[in-house]
Each structure stands twice: as C-alpha cells, then as structure tokens.
C-alpha cells in the first residue's frame, strides 16, 4: 500500500474509534479490522526501513502507530508499553520492528 505516512488507511477512516484520536476501540473492533490496522503499520515501518529513514536507529526497536514512527528504544516491551500509555492505545495496536545493525539477506 502506497501513501504518505500521515495518511489514514481506509480501515481507519471507516471506523472513527480507531483514528488515533485517543479513544482507542481496538479491542472492540472485529479481528479482521484489528489485523488490517496493524498490518498497515508494519507496511509503513518496512517502507521506512527500506528507504533508509530508520538507519539512525540501528540496533534499536522502532514503534509504528497510524503509519507513523511513534518512538524507538532498546527494549521492545518497554517501548510498546511507553507508546501505549502516551498515545492511549492498546499495546497490541502498535507495530514494533527491530532495526538490525547489518543487512538481513
């Protein structure tokens, strides 16, 4: 899926409870919608990774929410909980990737 990182996915636009406005309805959403939202964030994360936009975070974890980089850190669990509390979303709503120090083949 192409688009700017700030652009909301079609699934987010169709369910205002999930638009990242602080009223997280993620757990109440249908499983297919939950999956679509998180996959949108993983797609955005890997687009950033492939473009080199995350090179400065080598060796760290990166958290994505609503197709935007939400934070980075050395511990994935701590990062997930921090972003969850700051953004008032369920921890499972956040896509976390690891930025390796060297290319993965």
Image (cartoon, grey):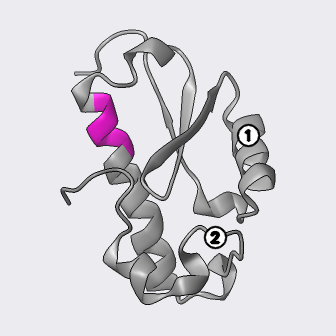
* Start-end of magenta stretch: 45-49
Q: Residue furthest left?
A: 2
Nearer the observer, 35 or 48: 48
Image quarter of residue 17: bottom right
Q: Main secondary structure of the magenta part?
A: helix
Image quarter of residue 1: bottom left
Q: In the rendering, at what x and y percent does residue 26 appear? A: 63, 77
**Front of the two marks 1 and 2:** 2
Task: Indicate the quadrant containing the C terminus: top left, top right, bottom left or bottom right.
Answer: top left
Residue 35 higher or lower than 32, as above or below: above
> Is 47 inside the magenta-drawn segment?
yes
The secondary element bearing badge 2 is classed as loop
Give the number of marks: 2
Crowding near the residue tagged with mark 1, few <14, some 14–19, many ≥20 C-alpha atoms within 10 Å: few
> Is 69 inside the magenta-drawn segment?
no
Upstream in sequence: badge 1 or badge 2:
2
Write the residue at 67% across / 81% down. Answer: 25
Write the residue at 70% across / 58% down. Answer: 91
**Circle 2 is placed at which residue position?**
21
Image quarter of residue 23: bottom right
Q: In the rendering, at what x and y percent does residue 57 appear? A: 50, 17
> In the image, which disc is placed on residue 77?
1
> In the image, which disc is placed on residue 32?
none
Residue 80 falls left or right of residue 95? right
Residue 59 higher or lower than 12, as above or below: above
Residue 10 falls left or right of residue 2? right
Write the residue at 71% across / 69% down. Answer: 22
């Amino acid at each position: 899926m192409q688009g700017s990182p700030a652009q909301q996915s079609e699934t987010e636009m169709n369910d205002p409870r999930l638009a990242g406005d602080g009223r997280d309805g993620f757990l109440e959403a249908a499983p297919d919608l939950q999956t679509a939202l998180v996959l949108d964030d993983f797609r955005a994360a890997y687009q950033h990774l492939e473009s080199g936009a995350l090179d400065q975070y080598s060796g760290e974890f990166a958290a994505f929410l609503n197709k935007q980089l939400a934070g980075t850190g050395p511990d994935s669990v701590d990062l997930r909980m921090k972003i969850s509390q700051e953004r008032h979303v369920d921890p499972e709503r956040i896509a976390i990737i690891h930025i390796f120090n060297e290319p993965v083949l």
